[in-house]
Amino acid sequence: MYPQSSQKKFWSFKTEQELQERRLLQNYNFIARHGAAMSEEQKAAFFLSADEERLLLKQYELQLKEFCKRFEPPMPKYVVGTAFHYFKRFYLNNSAMDYHPKEILATCVYLSCKVEEFNVSINQFVANIKGDRSKAMDIILSNELLLMQELNYYLTIHNPFRPVEGFLIDIKTRCHMNNPDRLRPGIEDFIDKTFLTNAILIYAPSQIALAAVLHAASKEQENLDSYVTESLFGAAEDKLPVLIEAVKRIRSMVRTIELPQKDKVRQLEKKLEKCRNQENNPDSQIYKQRMKKMYEDEDEAELMATSYHMNASDVSLEVSHLNSSNPANMSIE
Protein backbone atom coordinates (compact mmCIF):
# COMPACT_ATOMS: atom_id res chain seq x y z
CA MET A 1 0.00 0.00 0.00
CA TYR A 2 2.68 2.51 0.97
CA PRO A 3 4.65 2.30 -2.34
CA GLN A 4 1.53 3.47 -4.24
CA SER A 5 0.38 5.99 -1.62
CA SER A 6 0.18 9.79 -1.79
CA GLN A 7 2.53 9.77 1.21
CA LYS A 8 5.24 8.09 -0.85
CA LYS A 9 4.55 10.08 -4.01
CA PHE A 10 4.09 13.60 -2.64
CA TRP A 11 5.29 13.70 0.98
CA SER A 12 8.45 11.59 1.07
CA PHE A 13 11.80 13.28 0.54
CA LYS A 14 15.28 12.02 -0.24
CA THR A 15 17.45 13.89 2.25
CA GLU A 16 17.34 16.16 5.27
CA GLN A 17 19.05 18.78 3.10
CA GLU A 18 15.98 18.89 0.87
CA LEU A 19 13.76 19.49 3.90
CA GLN A 20 16.09 22.21 5.16
CA GLU A 21 15.96 23.98 1.81
CA ARG A 22 12.16 24.00 1.84
CA ARG A 23 12.10 25.45 5.35
CA LEU A 24 14.67 28.09 4.41
CA LEU A 25 12.52 29.07 1.44
CA GLN A 26 9.41 29.55 3.59
CA ASN A 27 11.38 31.68 6.04
CA TYR A 28 12.88 33.75 3.22
CA ASN A 29 9.52 34.29 1.52
CA PHE A 30 7.83 35.47 4.72
CA ILE A 31 10.58 37.96 5.53
CA ALA A 32 10.63 39.20 1.92
CA ARG A 33 6.87 39.87 2.08
CA HIS A 34 6.73 41.49 5.49
CA GLY A 35 10.14 43.12 5.80
CA ALA A 36 10.68 44.68 2.38
CA ALA A 37 11.29 48.14 3.86
CA MET A 38 13.80 46.92 6.47
CA SER A 39 17.57 46.69 6.32
CA GLU A 40 19.22 43.29 6.72
CA GLU A 41 20.17 44.17 10.30
CA GLN A 42 16.60 45.15 11.13
CA LYS A 43 15.26 41.93 9.58
CA ALA A 44 17.66 39.80 11.62
CA ALA A 45 16.65 41.58 14.83
CA PHE A 46 12.89 41.51 14.18
CA PHE A 47 12.14 38.22 12.40
CA LEU A 48 12.89 34.62 13.34
CA SER A 49 15.68 33.00 11.37
CA ALA A 50 15.09 29.59 9.79
CA ASP A 51 17.13 27.97 12.59
CA GLU A 52 15.09 29.80 15.23
CA GLU A 53 11.86 28.67 13.59
CA ARG A 54 13.06 25.08 13.59
CA LEU A 55 14.00 25.27 17.28
CA LEU A 56 10.61 26.70 18.17
CA LEU A 57 8.81 24.03 16.14
CA LYS A 58 10.77 21.33 18.00
CA GLN A 59 9.36 22.69 21.25
CA TYR A 60 5.83 22.54 19.86
CA GLU A 61 6.41 18.97 18.68
CA LEU A 62 7.18 18.12 22.31
CA GLN A 63 3.98 19.89 23.35
CA LEU A 64 2.01 17.93 20.74
CA LYS A 65 3.38 14.71 22.20
CA GLU A 66 2.45 15.71 25.76
CA PHE A 67 -1.01 16.94 24.74
CA CYS A 68 -1.79 13.59 23.12
CA LYS A 69 -0.36 11.69 26.08
CA ARG A 70 -2.67 13.50 28.53
CA PHE A 71 -5.71 13.39 26.25
CA GLU A 72 -8.97 11.97 27.57
CA PRO A 73 -10.25 9.57 26.41
CA PRO A 74 -6.85 7.89 25.82
CA MET A 75 -5.66 8.54 22.28
CA PRO A 76 -4.50 5.63 20.07
CA LYS A 77 -0.86 5.85 19.03
CA TYR A 78 -1.65 5.90 15.30
CA VAL A 79 -3.70 9.08 15.82
CA VAL A 80 -0.64 10.68 17.40
CA GLY A 81 1.54 9.56 14.49
CA THR A 82 -0.86 11.05 11.95
CA ALA A 83 -0.95 14.36 13.85
CA PHE A 84 2.85 14.54 13.73
CA HIS A 85 2.83 13.95 9.98
CA TYR A 86 0.32 16.76 9.46
CA PHE A 87 2.25 19.18 11.68
CA LYS A 88 5.57 18.54 9.95
CA ARG A 89 4.04 18.72 6.47
CA PHE A 90 2.29 22.02 7.20
CA TYR A 91 5.55 23.75 8.11
CA LEU A 92 7.28 22.57 4.97
CA ASN A 93 4.91 24.91 3.11
CA ASN A 94 4.48 27.66 5.70
CA SER A 95 6.44 29.75 8.16
CA ALA A 96 5.79 29.64 11.90
CA MET A 97 5.61 33.44 11.68
CA ASP A 98 2.62 33.18 9.36
CA TYR A 99 0.64 30.62 11.39
CA HIS A 100 1.38 30.19 15.08
CA PRO A 101 2.41 26.58 15.88
CA LYS A 102 0.23 26.42 18.98
CA GLU A 103 -2.90 26.95 16.85
CA ILE A 104 -1.84 24.61 14.04
CA LEU A 105 -0.84 21.94 16.58
CA ALA A 106 -4.36 21.67 18.00
CA THR A 107 -5.87 21.65 14.50
CA CYS A 108 -3.52 18.84 13.40
CA VAL A 109 -4.52 16.68 16.35
CA TYR A 110 -8.22 17.38 15.82
CA LEU A 111 -8.05 16.55 12.11
CA SER A 112 -6.08 13.36 12.80
CA CYS A 113 -8.80 12.25 15.24
CA LYS A 114 -11.37 12.61 12.48
CA VAL A 115 -9.30 10.99 9.73
CA GLU A 116 -8.31 8.03 11.93
CA GLU A 117 -11.91 7.66 13.15
CA PHE A 118 -11.10 8.30 16.79
CA ASN A 119 -14.56 9.65 17.48
CA VAL A 120 -14.47 12.67 19.78
CA SER A 121 -16.70 15.70 19.38
CA ILE A 122 -15.23 19.19 19.19
CA ASN A 123 -16.56 19.82 22.70
CA GLN A 124 -14.82 16.69 24.02
CA PHE A 125 -11.67 17.74 22.20
CA VAL A 126 -11.43 21.28 23.59
CA ALA A 127 -12.19 19.98 27.08
CA ASN A 128 -8.55 18.81 26.98
CA ILE A 129 -7.31 22.34 26.30
CA LYS A 130 -6.47 24.76 29.09
CA GLY A 131 -7.74 28.33 28.91
CA ASP A 132 -10.53 29.77 26.79
CA ARG A 133 -12.12 26.69 25.23
CA SER A 134 -14.66 28.62 23.19
CA LYS A 135 -11.85 30.58 21.57
CA ALA A 136 -9.87 27.36 21.02
CA MET A 137 -12.88 25.82 19.29
CA ASP A 138 -13.19 28.81 16.94
CA ILE A 139 -9.48 28.69 16.10
CA ILE A 140 -9.48 24.94 15.40
CA LEU A 141 -12.58 25.03 13.21
CA SER A 142 -11.42 28.10 11.29
CA ASN A 143 -7.99 26.49 10.61
CA GLU A 144 -9.27 23.03 9.66
CA LEU A 145 -9.89 23.81 5.99
CA LEU A 146 -6.60 25.72 5.76
CA LEU A 147 -4.74 22.68 7.10
CA MET A 148 -6.39 20.33 4.62
CA GLN A 149 -5.57 22.71 1.77
CA GLU A 150 -1.91 22.91 2.81
CA LEU A 151 -1.79 19.12 2.93
CA ASN A 152 -3.21 19.09 -0.62
CA TYR A 153 -6.02 16.95 0.83
CA TYR A 154 -3.65 13.97 1.08
CA LEU A 155 -4.81 12.89 4.52
CA THR A 156 -4.13 9.13 4.61
CA ILE A 157 -1.03 8.39 6.66
CA HIS A 158 0.92 5.12 6.80
CA ASN A 159 2.48 4.86 10.26
CA PRO A 160 5.11 2.28 11.35
CA PHE A 161 2.82 0.53 13.83
CA ARG A 162 1.31 -1.98 11.38
CA PRO A 163 4.72 -3.10 10.01
CA VAL A 164 5.88 -3.57 13.62
CA GLU A 165 3.09 -6.09 14.20
CA GLY A 166 4.12 -7.91 11.02
CA PHE A 167 7.75 -8.10 12.14
CA LEU A 168 6.81 -9.42 15.59
CA ILE A 169 4.61 -12.14 14.10
CA ASP A 170 7.40 -13.09 11.69
CA ILE A 171 9.99 -13.18 14.48
CA LYS A 172 7.74 -15.48 16.51
CA THR A 173 7.42 -17.75 13.47
CA ARG A 174 10.97 -17.83 12.13
CA CYS A 175 13.20 -17.00 15.10
CA HIS A 176 13.90 -18.77 18.35
CA MET A 177 13.69 -15.64 20.47
CA ASN A 178 12.14 -16.09 23.88
CA ASN A 179 8.97 -13.95 24.17
CA PRO A 180 9.39 -11.36 21.36
CA ASP A 181 6.59 -9.27 22.92
CA ARG A 182 9.07 -8.06 25.52
CA LEU A 183 10.48 -5.88 22.73
CA ARG A 184 7.30 -3.78 22.62
CA PRO A 185 8.21 -1.10 25.21
CA GLY A 186 11.53 -0.42 23.49
CA ILE A 187 9.88 -0.39 20.05
CA GLU A 188 7.17 2.05 21.10
CA ASP A 189 9.67 4.35 22.81
CA PHE A 190 11.85 4.38 19.70
CA ILE A 191 8.94 5.16 17.36
CA ASP A 192 7.77 7.97 19.66
CA LYS A 193 11.22 9.52 19.28
CA THR A 194 11.24 9.20 15.49
CA PHE A 195 8.26 11.58 15.44
CA LEU A 196 10.61 14.24 16.81
CA THR A 197 12.99 13.77 13.87
CA ASN A 198 12.82 14.09 10.08
CA ALA A 199 12.74 10.30 9.70
CA ILE A 200 8.99 10.10 9.03
CA LEU A 201 9.40 12.48 6.06
CA ILE A 202 12.25 10.49 4.51
CA TYR A 203 11.98 6.78 5.29
CA ALA A 204 9.26 4.21 4.66
CA PRO A 205 7.15 3.07 7.63
CA SER A 206 8.56 -0.46 7.27
CA GLN A 207 12.14 0.88 7.51
CA ILE A 208 11.29 2.84 10.65
CA ALA A 209 9.54 -0.21 12.09
CA LEU A 210 12.57 -2.44 11.45
CA ALA A 211 14.92 0.14 12.97
CA ALA A 212 12.68 0.18 16.07
CA VAL A 213 12.65 -3.63 16.31
CA LEU A 214 16.44 -3.91 15.95
CA HIS A 215 16.97 -1.11 18.49
CA ALA A 216 14.68 -2.78 21.02
CA ALA A 217 16.34 -6.15 20.42
CA SER A 218 19.80 -4.72 21.09
CA LYS A 219 18.49 -3.25 24.36
CA GLU A 220 17.37 -6.75 25.33
CA GLN A 221 20.76 -8.25 24.32
CA GLU A 222 19.16 -10.04 21.38
CA ASN A 223 20.83 -10.28 17.98
CA LEU A 224 18.56 -10.28 14.94
CA ASP A 225 21.25 -9.91 12.28
CA SER A 226 20.72 -13.42 10.90
CA TYR A 227 16.95 -12.86 10.84
CA VAL A 228 17.42 -9.74 8.67
CA THR A 229 20.08 -11.14 6.33
CA GLU A 230 18.69 -14.66 5.90
CA SER A 231 14.96 -14.61 6.63
CA LEU A 232 14.01 -11.13 5.41
CA PHE A 233 16.48 -10.57 2.59
CA GLY A 234 17.89 -14.00 1.81
CA ALA A 235 16.36 -13.87 -1.66
CA ALA A 236 17.06 -10.17 -2.26
CA GLU A 237 20.61 -9.54 -1.06
CA ASP A 238 21.01 -6.60 -3.46
CA LYS A 239 18.50 -4.61 -1.39
CA LEU A 240 20.24 -5.31 1.91
CA PRO A 241 22.86 -2.48 1.79
CA VAL A 242 20.17 0.15 1.22
CA LEU A 243 18.14 -1.17 4.14
CA ILE A 244 21.13 -1.34 6.47
CA GLU A 245 22.05 2.26 5.64
CA ALA A 246 18.45 3.42 6.24
CA VAL A 247 18.28 1.65 9.61
CA LYS A 248 21.61 3.14 10.68
CA ARG A 249 20.52 6.63 9.68
CA ILE A 250 17.17 6.36 11.47
CA ARG A 251 18.85 5.16 14.66
CA SER A 252 21.37 7.97 14.39
CA MET A 253 18.57 10.55 14.06
CA VAL A 254 16.93 9.23 17.23
CA ARG A 255 20.22 9.06 19.10
CA THR A 256 21.13 12.68 18.28
CA ILE A 257 17.82 14.37 19.20
CA GLU A 258 18.52 17.67 20.91
CA LEU A 259 15.84 19.13 23.18
CA PRO A 260 15.47 22.93 22.98
CA GLN A 261 16.61 24.98 25.96
CA LYS A 262 13.69 26.54 27.85
CA ASP A 263 15.34 29.97 28.18
CA LYS A 264 15.98 30.13 24.45
CA VAL A 265 12.41 29.02 23.69
CA ARG A 266 10.98 31.77 25.90
CA GLN A 267 13.01 34.37 24.02
CA LEU A 268 11.81 33.05 20.67
CA GLU A 269 8.19 33.01 21.86
CA LYS A 270 8.43 36.72 22.67
CA LYS A 271 10.05 37.43 19.33
CA LEU A 272 7.35 35.47 17.52
CA GLU A 273 4.56 37.47 19.17
CA LYS A 274 6.04 40.64 17.67
CA CYS A 275 6.87 39.39 14.19
CA ARG A 276 3.96 37.02 13.51
CA ASN A 277 1.47 37.85 10.76
CA GLN A 278 -1.22 39.82 12.57
CA GLU A 279 -3.79 38.92 9.91
CA ASN A 280 -3.65 35.38 11.30
CA ASN A 281 -3.52 36.36 14.97
CA PRO A 282 -6.95 35.83 16.63
CA ASP A 283 -6.07 38.47 19.26
CA SER A 284 -5.29 41.24 16.77
CA GLN A 285 -7.73 43.92 15.62
CA ILE A 286 -6.99 43.29 11.95
CA TYR A 287 -7.93 39.62 12.38
CA LYS A 288 -11.14 40.46 14.24
CA GLN A 289 -12.12 43.00 11.57
CA ARG A 290 -11.43 40.48 8.81
CA MET A 291 -13.54 37.83 10.52
CA LYS A 292 -16.34 40.32 11.16
CA LYS A 293 -16.38 41.30 7.48
CA MET A 294 -16.38 37.64 6.47
CA TYR A 295 -19.40 36.90 8.66
CA GLU A 296 -21.18 40.02 7.41
CA ASP A 297 -20.54 38.94 3.82
CA GLU A 298 -21.91 35.48 4.60
CA ASP A 299 -25.03 36.98 6.20
CA GLU A 300 -25.53 39.27 3.23
CA ALA A 301 -25.14 36.38 0.78
CA GLU A 302 -27.63 34.31 2.79
CA LEU A 303 -30.10 37.21 2.86
CA MET A 304 -29.80 37.70 -0.90
CA ALA A 305 -30.33 33.97 -1.49
CA THR A 306 -33.44 34.00 0.71
CA SER A 307 -34.77 37.06 -1.10
CA TYR A 308 -34.14 35.44 -4.48
CA HIS A 309 -36.03 32.29 -3.50
CA MET A 310 -38.97 34.36 -2.22
CA ASN A 311 -39.12 36.37 -5.46
CA ALA A 312 -38.84 33.21 -7.54
CA SER A 313 -41.73 31.73 -5.58
CA ASP A 314 -43.88 34.81 -6.23
CA VAL A 315 -43.13 34.64 -9.96
CA SER A 316 -43.97 30.93 -10.00
CA LEU A 317 -47.34 31.58 -8.37
CA GLU A 318 -48.11 34.37 -10.81
CA VAL A 319 -47.22 32.21 -13.84
CA SER A 320 -49.30 29.38 -12.44
CA HIS A 321 -52.28 31.71 -12.11
CA LEU A 322 -51.88 32.94 -15.69
CA ASN A 323 -51.56 29.40 -17.02
CA SER A 324 -54.76 28.30 -15.31
CA SER A 325 -56.77 31.27 -16.56
CA ASN A 326 -55.49 31.54 -20.12
CA PRO A 327 -57.05 29.09 -22.66
CA ALA A 328 -54.18 29.70 -25.07
CA ASN A 329 -51.93 27.73 -22.70
CA MET A 330 -54.06 24.65 -22.84
CA SER A 331 -52.77 21.65 -24.74
CA ILE A 332 -54.48 21.00 -28.16
CA GLU A 333 -54.66 17.49 -29.56
Image (tube, helix red, strand yellow):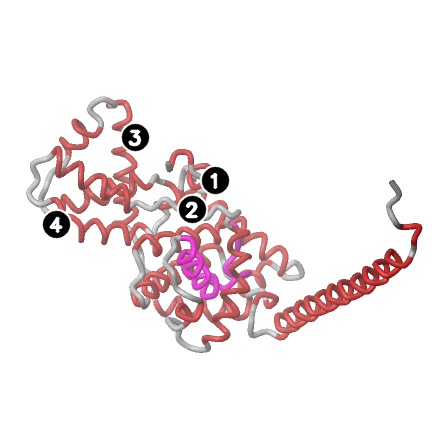
Badge 1: residue crowd in 10 Å (few <14, some 14–19, many ≥20) = few
Q: Which residues are magenta?
A: 93-115
Measure the alpha-carbon separation of dots 3 and 1.
21 Å
Query: Looking at the rendering, which quadrant does residue 117 occupy?
Result: bottom left
Q: Amino acid at mark 1?
A: Phe
User: Mark 1 — residue?
Assistant: 10
**SS at badge 1:** helix
Asked whether disc 4 touches disc 3, contact meaning CB atoms under 8 Å apart, the reply is: no
In this picture, residue 66 sits left or right of residue 182: right
Q: Quadrant of the N terminus?
A: top left
Q: In front: mark 3 or mark 2?
A: 2
**SS at badge 4:** helix
- Where does residue 194 sit, x and y in percent of width and height? 30, 50
Asked whether disc 2 touches disc 1, contact meaning CB atoms under 8 Å apart, the reply is: no
Above-or-below relation of 58 to 265 = above
Mark sitting earlier along the chain (2/4): 2
Mark sitting earlier along the chain (3/2): 2
Which residue is at 87% across, 40% downward? Answer: 333
Q: In front: mark 2 or mark 1?
A: 2
Which residue is at 10% across, 35% downward? Answer: 175
In this picture, residue 8 sits left or right of residue 319: left
Q: Amino acid at mark 4?
A: Arg
- Where does residue 30 sit, x and y in percent of width and height? 58, 56
Relative to the observer, which residue lies in front, 199 or 122?
122
Measure the alpha-carbon separation of dots 2 and 1.
12 Å
User: Mark 3 — residue?
Assistant: 242
In the picture, the disc for residue 182 is 4
